[in-house]
Amino acid sequence: MVALLILVISAIGLVNPLLIKVVFDQVFANVDGLPDDERMRLLLIVAGLMILMPILSGGLGLWQTFINNVVGQNVMRDLRNSLYAHLQHMPLRFFTSTRTGEIQSRLSNDVGGVQAVLTDTASSILSNIAIVLSTVVAMAYLNWRLTLLSLGILPVFLVISRRVGRIRREVSGLTQESLADLTAHMQETLSVSGILLSKSFGRQSYEIERFRKENQRLSDLEVRRTMVGRGFFSLVGIFFSITPAFVYLAAGYFEIRNPGAQALTPGTLVAFTTLQSRLFFPAGQLLNVGVEIQSSLALFDRIFEYLDLEREITDRDGAIELSAGEVTGEVRFNDVWFHYDRAGTLERPDDRVWTIQNIDLVARPGELVALVGPSGAGKTTLTYLLPRLYDVNRGSVTIDGIDVRDIQLASLGDAVGVVTQETYLFNSSVRDNLRYGNPEASDEEIEEAARAAHIWERLDEMPEGLDTVVGERGYKLSGGEKQRLAIARVILKDPRILILDEATSALDTHSERLVQQALAPLTKGRTTVAIAHRLSTILAADTIVYMDGGRIVERGTHTELLRRDGAYASLYHEQFSDGRVESRCEDGLVLSSGEVVAEAS
Ligand code: ATP
């Protein structure tokens, strides 16, 4: 359809210059000696056609532009969709090693940057070729010698355009990099955490200066990019503007030297130069297309660099779907080894690189397994392996005896719920944030979950209740409130298996108590793997695992481990001696409080 339109439009474009020849030769010069009424009729027809043709070609041109845009925008939309979907499936490893701003910049700036090529350049190639070819044919038909004279130099421009294109590609790559740097800088420093940091360290002027520098680099690059393109286009423009002079010069020269030998009527000459001036834009654009495409290739390179990245963690062929009702929730780690370097990049990982080594661990349905140990022991990392945020390097992790790598990721996600140390909330209403756990939850269910998580009373006090907007990353809420919301969110999700990265250490005693009260109904009936910094949470755990250096050093119940008087016992005594556990025992909050006090004393 577009091709047909293009052909029609370029054919229409030829009509007017050829009509000029008729007007000049037949009406004004009357070279064929036509009678006056015939000339008048011809004049009216030609004038009518000269009015009609531009209107027709204008209308068709508009239609063609519309189709071009729809097609181009559809390609852009698909590109954005697939890039976003691909990013959603990228492994956590990718996000921990890439700046968020860089990702955002590729998704918006780079995809946006290829728009011009998709909507204008690419689609106009055909129309420009059609115009150029038909015009050149018409010119050659009028006079082939003059055609050769006026177009002979074009190949030189082809060579120049390739050079310019290469420079543009390079500059475009640099520009997009700089734009990504700037976006990343903005994203990092203008987020709530970034602003908090720069304000509290009084580093605003430093950040402003850093921004200024990068911004200056970007604008310099943009100017360079534009000028490289413009400069070339001007060169083409100058060429096309001066060639009529050569055409007149040559035609005039031969006419004076050899009158009549060229069979050049004034009409032919005017029609010829008109056709030639019609060449300027399409030929200029065609020459420029190479340049534009080269520079957009730099952007495509950046987009495809992401699209070509391996998803790493994907569903295997024939992966099993865990049906929500049937999961019993037995979790096993079988001789699990893991390191953070990408699989295969290390030839022979030695002891130092293993973050997790030789872990064997069982959590039976409904049990609470607690992970304790010094910072950096690998507790969080171990829990990452269960929902496949990373895959094990050796050994296996199973749910109900099925290797997690054989379970469909979507159903694995349904079966495992995570309450992370740092609570992430979207900047929308409390209700929307809670519904993230279960999009179908009714207001009653939300209230029930909020009550169970001991956050309902607080929400009730807020004038807008569930409609309260939590602010960027939940900054309008206190740490404890955010955590209780996160707990309510998981209650709504109702997973069989729960991973709890305890973060109560950051809270005051009152909030901590509320959070712990919220946790009690959450862990009930679920297989729970809890990372505990405060031992009070896990005294009643079925198994307590003490990790150090990625290995399990001790395991047993609280009583057994105390009796053993090893690493766990000293950790316990350390916390016990500062009085925290004691005070909570008096509150009756610690499930095995009697035992604790008895053991301790
Ligand atoms: P904490 O109690 O302080 O949270 P943890 O026991 O949970 O500590 P992990 O977060 O599992 O410890 O970290 C274990 C080790 O792995 C640490 O030495 C850490 O530096 C390293 N590590 C964590 N995340 C990454 C990562 N994305 N890439 C490389 N190394 C990492």
Image: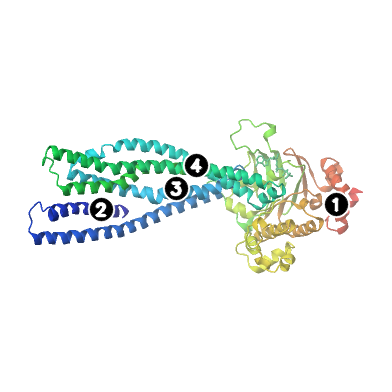
Q: Give the CA distance from mark 4 to mark 3.
A: 17 Å
Q: Position of residue 471 (x, y in %)?
A: 65, 59
Instruction: Please name the residue that numbered disc 4 is placed on.
Output: 221
Residue 311 visible in the picture: no
Q: Position of residue 207 (x, y in %)?
A: 64, 45
Q: Give the CA distance from mark 1 to mark 4.
A: 61 Å
Q: Are marks 2 and 3 in contact (CB under 8 Å)?
A: no
Q: Give the CA distance from mark 2 to mark 4.
A: 38 Å
Q: Which mark is residue 13?
A: 2
Going from N to C along the chain, the mark reached first, 1 or 4, is 4
Q: Nearer the viewer, mark 2 or mark 1?
A: 2
- Queried on whether the Cβ of the residue with tag 4 lies below 8 angstroms from ligand 1, the answer reads no
Going from N to C along the chain, the mark reached first, 3 or 1, is 3
Going from N to C along the chain, the mark reached first, 2 or 4, is 2
Classify mark 3: residues with Cα within 10 Å, few (<14), some (14-19) or many (20+).
many
> Does 437 sit above or below residue 87?
below
Q: Quadrant of ligand 1?
A: top right
Q: Secondary structure at mark 4?
A: helix
45 left or right of 178 in image: left
Q: Position of residue 582 (x, y in %)?
A: 88, 53
Observer-nearest residue: 186 or 557? 186
Say what amino acid the circle numbered 1 marks.
Val
Instruction: Please name the residue that numbered disc 1 is placed on.
Output: 581
Instruction: Please name the residue that numbered disc 3 is placed on.
Output: 114
Going from N to C along the chain, the mark reached first, 2 or 3, is 2
| Residue 23 occupies quadrant | bottom left
Say what amino acid the circle numbered 3 marks.
Val
Q: Nearer the viewer, mark 3 or mark 1?
A: 3
Say what amino acid the circle numbered 2 marks.
Gly
Q: Residue at x 20, y 61 (%)?
A: 48
